[in-house]
Image: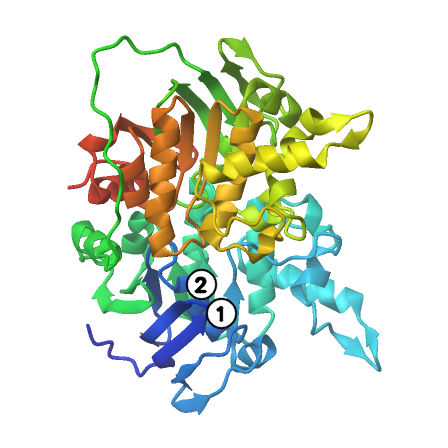
Amino acid sequence: MAPDPRPPLLTMSGITKSFPGVRALDGVDLEVAPGEVHCLLGQNGAGKSTLIKVLAGAHQPDGGHVVWNGEPVRLRSPSAAVRLGIATLHQELDLVEGLSVAENTHLGHEPATAGFVRARAARTATAALLKRLGHPEIDPARRVGGLSAAQRQIVSMARALSHDVRLIVMDEPSAALDPDEVDNLFRIVADLTADGVAVLYISHRLEEIRRIGDRVTVLKDGRAVARGLPAATTPTREVVALMTGRDVPYAFPDRPGPDGAPAPEPVLTVQGLARQGEFEAFDLVLRPGEIVGLAGLVGSGRSEILETVYGARRPTAGRVLVDGRPLRPGSVPAAVRAGLGLAPEERKAQGLLLLESVTRNVSVSSLGRFSRAGWIDRAAERAAARTATRGLSLRPDHPEAPVRTLSGGNQQKAVLARWLLRGCRVLLLDEPTRGVDVGARAELYAVVRRLADEGLAVLLVSSEVPEVLGLADRVLVLREGRVVHEAPARDLDEHRVLDLVMEGSPAA
């Protein structure tokens, strides 16, 4: 670990945290000095979010110690962290859209006299903070709901600075910013650190880390695999290798080789699809039996593309065609009728009726088949659902069991069975193995490959690069809403993809 000449402001030692079935943090050490920009890196699921929630007082660690400015402390709540001078800017900004900028800035600690809030004083203090942050044009009286993403980020920073802050945690602060706004963010960070404020900076963008960071800590599988690396001089290859080393093997089915037959006509064609602020000019040709993977970081537009193809989001440009016929934009029913099915990232919240039976979850998109004069033929519904689930080896084989009682892998199979029963021809898979244990993953991979071999077209999104490379025939690499590379999966490796999504250019 590279030494820092300054005594540490924050020391976290041996931090552990477990959730049911998951050890999110496994003895993590972290040290941050006053006036330092300390960068925290790691792939999705490495433990970054859990660690900063412990630091913010939102999670209580199962073990370990926290020392703040030389004194042992217990961060029992978010308010306790704030009182010490720790502020956290989460990736999903927790602002109240219906309140004004000034009200958000001083929420929970409003200037008051004899119990009455002094609104003018709050606006005056907020204006001074906004000026310090380089945005005097933001009106403290304006409702936050009408601000741009960059302006909301500034308001969140103003709220942090409205306290006597000594450490600011910034979680992907540049994700929604354009280059000029990122420059302003870095100016703000430089001003803060010049005043002795420490910054714990989380980002997937290695070019930002080199530009702004002092030292780097890398997390992998809940452990700190490197601490205190010099941010400016540590090679990209070394950082990527630290982030991607794995203990769990991935078992993927073999891809079929070329059979010499002419390629089938495309089932799905996407032409110039775009959504302002999310992704731009996305093109795709997907044929029956093909699995195409979208690789990219959170915020790269992966999930938004799937949802727009499916009609859950309305595009600002471009079109989607099935069998050469354009779909009505922004219409889920039109997409489903054309043979598209979506297995969403948040399957419990968006893809399942948790209190309903397995049968009803499988049949819900095909209920018209079982309806007679307004009544559902339950026997026919059960028989059809049973056939669909047996083809996927869903366990336990109890069609009337509530779907919430199934494991993550079997819940995902229930979603897949729904679309197979519907006669889906294009399956949109978003994070198909999230919340699925290691043993069930290989089983799901085999199911997806078998479905593709039977002629289903699959468009896959996953944060796990090995999953994309192991399942897909062809990969499109996304960065900041644009496709920066396309290649057969066999021509890529994990380091190459991560270099592309982080740097937007081939690895050195």
Mark linked to residue 45: none
**Residue appearing at x 51%, y 73% in the figure:** 56
Q: Secondary structure at mark 1?
A: helix
Q: Position of residue 193 (x, y in %)?
A: 40, 68
212, 434: nearer the viewer:
434
Query: How many numbered marks, from 0 up?
Result: 2
Quarter that holds the C terminus = top left
Residue, x 26% and y 40% (percent of image)?
497
Residue 149, compared with residue 274, is above or below; it is below
Depicted 72 relative to depicted 268: above or below: below
For label 2, the residue is: 49
**Considering depth in this image, is 261 or 145 the residue closer to the camera?**
261
Residue 466: percent from left, percent from top? 28, 44
From this viewpoint, is residue 301 visible?
Answer: no
Asked whether 101 or 397 is in front, the reply is 397
User: Where on the picture, by quarter, is residue 404?
Assistant: bottom right
Q: Amino acid at mark 1?
A: Lys
Q: Nearer the viewer, residue 118 or 313?
A: 313
C-alpha span from label 2 to label 1: 6 Å
Disc 2 secondary structure class: helix
Percent across and percent down for residue 143 are 73, 50
Label 1, residues with CA under 10 Å away: few <14, some 14-19, many ≥20: some
**Relative to 29, 415 lies left or right:** right
One can see residue 444 in this view: yes
Q: Is residue 491 above or below residue 27?
A: above
Q: Are marks 2 and 1 in contact (CB under 8 Å)?
A: yes
Residue at the (25%, 32%) spot, across then down: 489
x and y, in percent, of residue 117 in the image: 81, 72
At label 2, counting other C-alpha atoms closer than 10 Å, the crowd grade (few under 14, some 14-19, many 20 or more) is some
Disc 1: which residue? 53
Amino acid residing under circle 2: Ser
